[in-house]
Amino acid sequence: MNATGVTVPAGPESSRASAPVVYAVDVRTGRSREVFAVREDGLNVVPGLGR
């Protein structure tokens, strides 16, 4: 994301819970913000995340 931020995917523990979400987290402050919910078809582009 930037010099102090990382991209973090987070998913539910059970498959019946809500969809996984991708967050941007500032590693200095610990503050986070939701970037987007992961699409069911798997066609997502996440900056900085390899597959």
Image (spheres, grey):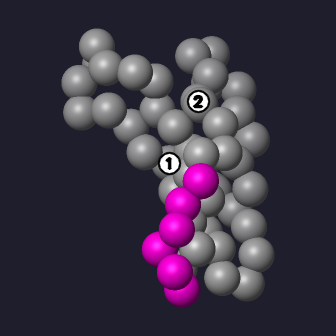
Q: Is residue 40 above or below residue 47?
A: above
Q: Main secondary structure of the magenta part?
A: loop
- Seen at 46% across and 32% down, the residue is 20
Using the image, determine if residue 8 lies above or below residue 13.
below
Q: Secondary structure at mark 2?
A: loop
Going 63% across and 16% down the picture, which residue do you hit? Answer: 41
Locate the N terminus and report the quarter of the image it occupies.
bottom right
Front-most of residues 40 and 27 = 27
Would you name the residue on which mark 1 appears? 9
Callout 2: 10 Å neighbours few (<14), some, many (20+)?
Answer: some
Instruction: Judge by depth and name the residue closer to the eye, 29 or 23.
Output: 29
Q: Are marks 2 and 1 in contact (CB under 8 Å)?
A: yes
Residue 10, image x, y percentages: 43, 45
Please, is residue 36 above or below residue 48 in the view? above
| Quadrant of residue 32 within the rendered picture | bottom right
Question: Residue at position x 74%, y 56% from top?
Answer: 47
Q: Which disc is residue 33 wearing? A: none
Spatial CA distance of label 2 from label 1 is 9 Å
Amino acid found under the numbered disc labelled 1: Pro
Mark 1 neighbour class, 10 Å CA radius: few under 14, some 14 to 19, many 20 or more: some
37 horizontally vs 12: left or right? right
In this picture, which residue range is highlighted in magenta? 28-33
What residue is drawn where x is 61% and y is 59%? 24
Q: Amino acid at mark 2?
A: Val
Q: Between residues 33 and 14, which one lies in front from this camera angle?
A: 33
Residue position for label 2:
38
